[in-house]
Image (cartoon, rainbow, N blue to C red):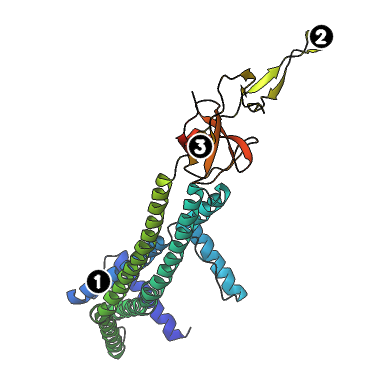
Amino acid sequence: MSVAGFKKQFYKASQMVSEKVGGAEGTKLDEDFKDLERKVDVTGKTVVEVISKTSEYLQPNPASRAKLSMLNTMSKIRGQVKNPGYPQAEGLLGECMSKFGRELGEETNFGGALMDAGDTMKRMAEVKDSLDIDVKQNFIDPLQGLYDKDIREIQHHLKKLEGRRLDYDYKKKRLGKIPDEEVKQALEKFHESKEVAETSMYNLLETDQIEQVSQLSSLVESQVQYHRQAVQILEELSEKLKDRIMEAQSRPRREYIPKPKPVYEFPEPDQSNGGFTPSVAPPPARSSDPYLQFGRASTRKPRPLSEQACCKALYDFEPENEGELGFHEGDIITLTNQIDENWYEGALRGQSGFFPLNYVEVVVPLPH
């Protein structure tokens, strides 16, 4: 630092101490200038806070934001072009729904609905990513540029102005000891800095306001576009779920039919160790003698073929257990016996077996 520069720094420091400690008064700036300075200060704070809160609005999770910021920094250091994206809540929810939808099975009503909802949530996450990009490009980045360039430049001019004011006040109070020319030169530099700072503040508040409102309009337009797309996507999902509900309601409910209870065969006392061996009861036996049913003589005589007991299948029935008779909707099944209040025994296309009562409609009833 030159001798002149060192002396100037000494003058400013001395004047500042005099004002802070000794209560000396410095040169006052006019009220219009102070009003401009106050508005610029508020504008700077506004820009910083709005950028921060907008980032929180787009990316609510602070831990994820911090991790993403670190990864982006590392990507820049490594020269990587593609940066990892923010994990959108809709995307995480969609992955969860899709995972458990696959585990339940897409053929089940709930599993299929979860798959549909999962795909929709993933699409919502993509739309949210687009919102993030649009808002950053059209709102956050321009505001950040305003702060980094215009507001910081004004702050630099105000700091320079304060330094020149202190220099001028120090020299003014020592008029006679300091040459008049030097005092006059300090006053000119003070007025020069004041004019530059005042012009910069005026331009920011009057001219750039249009750009700032335009940027705010871009934010709102991006939000409108996001919500419009979100509504369209969710309405499509809503229609799919309504269709699933209607389909499930119109489908015949298959009643639970308990399996035959196991029969426990107790061994002889000398062979028993205190336990017993269960065995599953066999299905009802079908006698080859038309007059024998379930091991007892029947007094019924065979009916003519035209009056043979039969029923019509109302729905498809797929056999799940051994001894059951499968058929398709519309099939005419010959009835041979009613096992209990839930099951018939019958024959179809050379096959015989058991089937539930609520899947058929009796055409010719069994004889009493």
User: In front here: 81 or 97?
Assistant: 97
Comparing 84 with 194, the one in front is 84
Sequence-first disc among 2 and 1: 1
Residue positioned 70% across, 22% down in the render: 278
At horizontal 54% and vertical 49% (from top left) the residue drawn is 100
Which dot marks residue 39?
Answer: 1
Of badges 3 and 2, the one in the foreground is: 3
Q: Where in the figure is residue 176, as x and y percent of width and height?
A: 27, 84
Asked if residue 16 can be seen in this view, the reply is: yes
Q: Tell me whether the residue at label 3 lies in contact with that at label 1, contact meaning CB atoms closer than 8 angstroms.
A: no
For residue 306, which numbered disc appears in the image?
3
| Residue type, numbered disc 3 | Ser
Rendered position, 328 above or below 185: above
**Label 1 Cα neighbours within 10 Å, binned few <14 / some 14-19 / many ≥20:** some
Residue 123, image quadrant: bottom left
Q: Secondary structure at mark 2?
A: helix
Identified by mark 2, the residue type is Asp
Callout 3: SS: helix
Q: Assign a secondary structure to mark 1.
A: helix
Q: Quick check: 290 above or below 156?
A: above
For badge 1, the amino acid type reads: Lys
Say the numbered circle drawn on residue 270.
Answer: 2
